[in-house]
Image: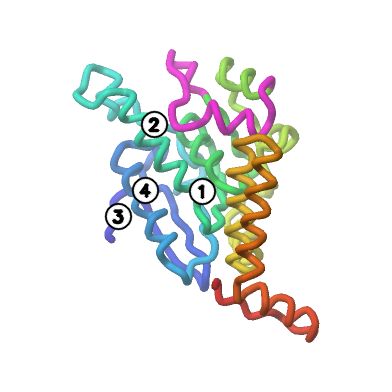
Amino acid sequence: MAYEFILVEKEDNIAVVTLNRPPANALNQGLMSELGVLIDQVQADNEIRALVVTGAGEKFFSAGADLKEMPSLFGGETGPGEMTRRGQAIFTKFERSSTPVIAAINGMAFGGGCELALACHFRMAAQSAKIGLVEVNVGIMPGYGGTQRLPRLIGRAKAIEMATLGLQVPAEAAFGIGLLNEVVPDAELLGKAKEFAKRVAAQAPVAVALIIDAIIRGSETDIDQGQNIEAENFEKVVQSADAIEGVQAFIQKRKPNYQGR
């Protein structure tokens, strides 16, 4: 598919998608739709074992939703509930993707940009980056899952503080509260993100997918049901060809050759 607002490139068994809507990579409905198509294509491509998401330019990962292109907020035909649920569904695809997704936050990640990063499995940021749910600063609130994912990552108290004050949190501070996995020098961000993606891609794809599934679904329920999910996924993983290959490679003291089945 030819995209208008995103750039996609493959490098070995990883893919990099770049939000490309200058000047701030704002999330209009066209870009959101393309992200939905992209994550479906990644899921269907067995050769892709990790996905990196970043923004074009040096200043913005994404400034969030483009308010000027959201007619539902200003008397348009599309209701705000419908628009919100559509965006939530797209970001949920990222969160529940069996292909690991790494956000490489190259600049400001505000509002919907922050929510996209929250939906990724890993978050790596440049030292100059800032992140925040800033919607309250224009009299609205997060609508793409931010009020649900942020407290699950950093706890309710800090999440309420960030979202109600519309804070723009510097990368080092975001790392300190557990919002980011790593902070790196600006010039090294994309290279480091690709290196990380390759490390994840080298693991057994079946095991990685089932681990992500168990953690995501388990975190949404109580521990007893979560452990049931874990047991079900463990039963699936030990029946995979990758598990047999992994154990044999360990015994034979060689590098495993995972096939993703």
Question: Does the rendering let one see residue 244?
Answer: yes
Identify the residue at horizontal 60%, vertical 38% (top origin): 129
First-in-chain label (4 vs 3): 3
Residue under label 1, please give it: 96
Amino acid type at circle 1 is: Arg
Quick one: quadrant of the C terminus? bottom right
Q: How is the image coloured?
A: rainbow
Q: Are marks 1 and 4 in contact (CB under 8 Å)?
A: no
Identify the residue at horizontal 40%, vertical 43% (top origin): 90
Amino acid type at circle 2 is: Ala
* Foreground disc of the pair 4, 3: 4
Secondary structure under the numbered disc 3 in the rendered image: loop
Give the Cα separation between the discs numbered 2 and 3. Answer: 19 Å
Residue under label 4, please give it: 36
Amino acid type at circle 4 is: Gly
Q: Are marks 1 and 3 in contact (CB under 8 Å)?
A: no
Secondary structure under the numbered disc 4 in the rendered image: helix
Residue under label 2, please give it: 65
Please rate how many residues cluster around mark 1, counting C-alpha atoms within 10 Å: few if below 14, some from 14 to 19, many from 20: some
- Left/right placement of residue 54 relative to residue 41 reads right
What residue span does the magenta drawing correspond to? Answer: 134-157
Asked where in the image residue 251 lies, by quadrant, the reply is: bottom right
Give the Cα separation between the discs numbered 1 and 3. Answer: 23 Å
Please tell me the numbered disc located at residue 3: 3
